Image (tube, coloured by chain):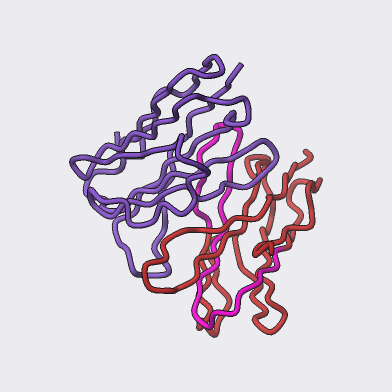
Chain colours: A purple, B red
């Protein structure tokens, strides 16, 4: 497909479990972003990749959250020991350029994570 | 301190009327970009319009225009001739043009409902 793809679209997990959320960016986009959107809020930045490396992970809430992008394309957001407060929609976005303030970010439809 | 403020949690507008969605922002940077995104119930964020801090003219994209008042730090979105398909959440966002900064900061959004 032409857009950003996120899988799964929905994930229900038990408190304390480990989850992985996958993002397939638009082909050729070097920048990839993860955001978290809690109910009734706007998206909040988590982490940004430039190629394979995490250029800015200042938004990760704690060390239970980790993300990788080993080949500079697909990215996985990993959450250990999930808590009920982690329940949110996790949005992935990609863009073709960095360092340009007007670069548009293209978003996927998100993964709705529910921790019970 | 909240950097993006959207004071209208919800708005109801008659079809074919124009609507203005408010956004104020806070930054000490001189160079920044302002974005509006639409989020329908499907969840993905759809880019609508961009305004750069140094742009002298208000941005326009089809039925969307941005009323940019730099001194007041406001960037209101105007949708002309509203359509039923415009019903969605609308988010204002900002990117500060600092070296290495790629993240978007979003407001809490406005839910727009178009009434037939």
**Residue B32 is a magenta residue:** yes
Between B10 and A47, the one lying in front of the other is A47
Name the residue: 56% across, 48% down: A44
The x, y position of residue A95, in whole percent, is 34, 54
Between B38 and A65, the one lying in front of the other is A65
The x, y position of residue B61, in whole percent, is 52, 63
Quarter of the image containing the N terminus of chain A?
A: top left
**Region in magenta:** B23-48
In the figure, A73 relative to B34: above or below?
above
Name the residue: 39% across, 63% down: A103
Q: Is residue A102 left or right of residue B89?
A: left
Q: Number of labelled discs?
A: 0
Q: Is residue A6 left or right of residue B87?
A: left
Name the residue: 71% across, 61% down: B5
Between B3 and B60, the one lying in front of the other is B3
In the figure, B87 relative to A84: above or below?
below
The x, y position of residue B89, in whole percent, is 66, 44
- Asked which quadrant contains residue B116, the reply is top right
């Amino acid at each position: 497909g032409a857009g950003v793809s996120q899988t799964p679209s929905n994930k229900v997990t038990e408190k304390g479990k480990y989850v992985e959320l996958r993002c397939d960016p638009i082909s050729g986009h070097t920048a990839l972003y993860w955001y978290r959107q809690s109910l009734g809020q706007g998206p909040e930045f988590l982490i940004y990749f430039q190629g394979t490396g995490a250029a800015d992970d200042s938004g990760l809430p704690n060390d239970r959250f980790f993300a990788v992008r080993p080949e500079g394309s697909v990215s996985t957001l990993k959450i250990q020991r999930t808590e009920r407060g982690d329940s949110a929609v996790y949005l992935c976005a990609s863009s073709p350029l960095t360092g340009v303030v007007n670069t548009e970010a293209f978003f996927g439809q998100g993964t709705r994570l529910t921790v019970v | 301190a909240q950097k993006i403020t959207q004071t209208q949690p919800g708005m109801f507008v008659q079809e074919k009327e124009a609507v203005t969605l408010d956004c104020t922002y806070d930054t000490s940077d001189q160079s920044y970009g302002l974005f509006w995104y639409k989020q329908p119930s499907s969840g993905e964020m759809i880019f609508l319009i961009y305004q750069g801090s140094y742009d002298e003219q208000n941005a326009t994209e089809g039925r969307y225009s941005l009323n940019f008042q730099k001194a007041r730090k406001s960037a209101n979105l105007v949708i002309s001739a509203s359509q039923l398909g415009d019903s969605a959440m609308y988010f204002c966002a900002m990117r500060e043009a600092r070296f290495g900064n790629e993240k978007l900061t979003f407001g809490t959004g406005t839910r727009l409902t178009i009434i037939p």
